[in-house]
Image (cartoon, rainbow, N blue to C red):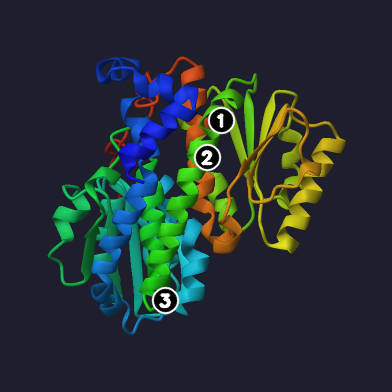
Amino acid sequence: MSQADWLLALTKSQSKAAELFGRSEEEQRRLGYFHTLREICQQPWTWLRTCQVMLAAREKFQKSLEGMRSLTLTGSGSSQYAAECVHSTIRNGAGLRTESVGGGDLLTYGGKVLPPDRPGLLISLARSGDSPESRGAMELLLDTEPEVRHIVLTCNEQGSLTKAWRDHAKVLVTTLPRETNDQSLVMTSSFTNLLLAARFMGMLAKPDEYERLCRGMSDIAKEVIAKNFDALAEIAKLNFERVVFLGTGSRFAASREAALKMLEMTAGRVTTLCETYLGFRHGPMSYVQDKTLLVGFLSSDPILRAYEVDLLQELDRKNLGLSKLVVGENIPLRILRKQDLAVECEGLGALGDEEAASIDVVVAQLLGFFRCLQEGLRPDSPSKDGIIQRVVESFPLHTPS
């Protein structure tokens, strides 16, 4: 099914989609959701285009990895969370010591926070490539770490990272499809596409498997959006003031991005917390009040799921929270109360929990989008006072004298 046909079917089956997409472009822009809505809903198709970009550059990536003894992924803000979602799966596939490090840590500590094994490869993820940390960290490491090579994965062919280093001998710059460079303040398409692009670094020897993964993720996302658009709009209307996002492994990294999306899209009116299921008992459970929405990314692995179900049932026994939103496959009815919502993701278990982060985040993006509208804010620019901006505003970079 083409993207246009899918969108038409969505507006016929989901009344909220019919309402939002049914308005003229001028009215959507006036209400401030034109870009964000499209950027969320286009993701299943952008993933397929990003897949082709990465496959076409496979030989270049393999050459960059030759002889490497360590691999580090980095980014700032959402881009850092994208790196955290995939670094453990890349480690398993690439057979290298693999870590994720925030761009701010690289800027302030330089090579001290990189794995000691040299030579090493640093993969930088960036939507715009214009943030001060991205530029500053790259300059610092090129000057001080001669045994570190660089790959830049970015959504912006006109960004500073692309322009400054695309011809540098130690830097390989790869630009994702133009439509992944979100025009909205919040990262949606850019986040999941950067995540999926980085994922290829652990599958360079298995290009066919990578393509199947991208197609599988795309199919799941189409169904999740098509079947849950209205339901997520309804749960976003609940009278919650706080949201807790729970996940395990790479899905905990997804919960960090999910928490940020809700915080950004509501301009801080809805506060958020993210935690692992097992870590939640060690103090963070005290965050839950009567007006708290609990969002659980539920694993398919039976051992992980057993621990997660135990925690969700404990929350029910203690009568904590306003409602639960559970995302996963074959979600057991025993963990759902009358007011809870289950988002079924058929096929997710077959792909594996380590690949589920993108689907979790798509659900969280829609939840944040609908809550933003409920708050009377504009999803394309929810920070109406300009407290945060699409690209972090410039700040001084401090270097040793």
Q: Residue at x 77, y 49 (%)?
A: 309
Q: Against 383, is 200 above or below?
A: below
- The three-letter amino acid code for the residue at tag 2 is Val
Q: Against 211, is 240 above or below?
A: above
Q: Give residue 194's position: percent from left, percent from top.
A: 36, 54
Res. 232 mark:
1
The residue labelled by disc 2 is: 363
Pointers 2 and 1 in contact (CB under 8 A)?
yes
The quadrant holding residue 273 is top right
Q: Give residue 112's position: percent from left, percent from top.
A: 42, 67
The residue labelled by disc 3 is: 70
Q: Give residue 83's position: percent from left, percent from top.
A: 44, 57
Q: Calculate the distance from the C-alpha at mark 2 to the C-alpha at mark 1.
A: 8 Å
Tag 1's secondary structure? helix
Q: Calculate the distance from the C-alpha at mark 1 to the C-alpha at mark 3.
A: 41 Å
Disc 2 vs disc 3: which is toward the camera?
2
Left or right: where does residue 346 sit relative to residue 211?
right
Q: Residue at x 58, y 23 (%)?
A: 234
- The three-letter amino acid code for the residue at tag 3 is Ser
Pick the front one: 109 or 251: 251
